[in-house]
Image (cartoon, helix red, strand yellow):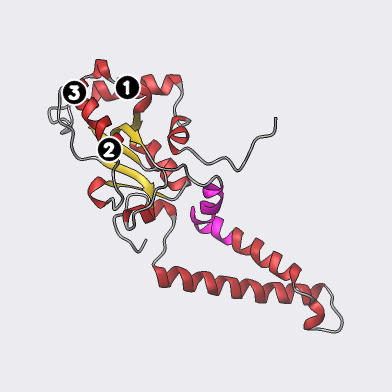
Amino acid sequence: MMLNVMTPTDLEKVLERTHTADTQEQLFNNLKQNLEDIEIQSVNQFDFDALETHRIYHIDQIKKVSIQYRLRFLDSKFFKGTIPDEAQAAVARLETTHRTTLADFKIMAPSIMFRLAKTDDPLLFAPMGNDYFYLIHKWGNDLHPLRRLRMWPFMNIWNLLLMLLVVSGVLTSLTPLSIFTKNPDSTSFWMLYFFMFKAVVSIVLFYGFALGKNFNPAIWNSKYNKS
């Protein structure tokens, strides 16, 4: 059966794939031990016996997925969308189960959702202390299936450079050399390729500087718009 590459990306399942049965148990044990060893704990006090270990994520796992899909992981106060009733109900159920009041929520979502009201798969987390977070609820639509591929060039400068080289090659191949010379040859091709590359780089640099864009690792937990 052929895999349907156009299936929307469920962000919660992407996060789940950062887990294995062993790492889930290891995360749980490390968190419990670390919180027992320190005097000052997180503002959110959980009943460890009532926790679902598959919902516990370390900040490194959240960071990895955020960078891959160009997402933000920010305090809920920066979220401009509407947190639905089912998410609030999930919080209430969790508070009842753990006999506590939760606070300092975090949300993982595409950057634009922290400026405009959109519906692209936000995830609501509560901090547990020691860089661990508990996934409470997911809502909205799944991410576009090609989002990770689209965001790949923004992972780092080398990815971006490779993309620019490929795009320049495609544009050069589509441009008839006869427009510029009566005797097309390899030298003409590479001269046109170099011209295309400079033009594409100039457009990308202008776009990047004009909009204050940055690479994924620099923005995943940034609260500033121009990043």
Return the residue nearer the eye: 116 or 181: 116
Determine the CA span between mark 3 and mark 1. Answer: 21 Å
**Mark 3 element type:** helix
Q: Residue 130: where, in percent of width, then height? A: 25, 33
Residue kind at label 1, given as amino acid type: Phe
Asked if the stretch drawn in magenta spans residue 118, the answer is: no
| Magenta span includes 159 | yes
Task: From the viewer's perspective, tell me whether residue 168 is left or right of residue 184.
Answer: left
The reply to whether the C-beta atoms of the residues labelled 3 and 1 are less than 8 Å apart is no
What's the mark number on residue 138?
Answer: none
Residue 15: percent from left, percent from top: 43, 34
Viewer can see residue 159: yes
- Residue that sits furthest to the right in the current view: 183
Q: Which residue is mark 3?
A: 96
| Label 1: which secondary element | helix
Q: Which residue is mark 2?
A: 85
Quarter of the view holding residue 172: bottom right
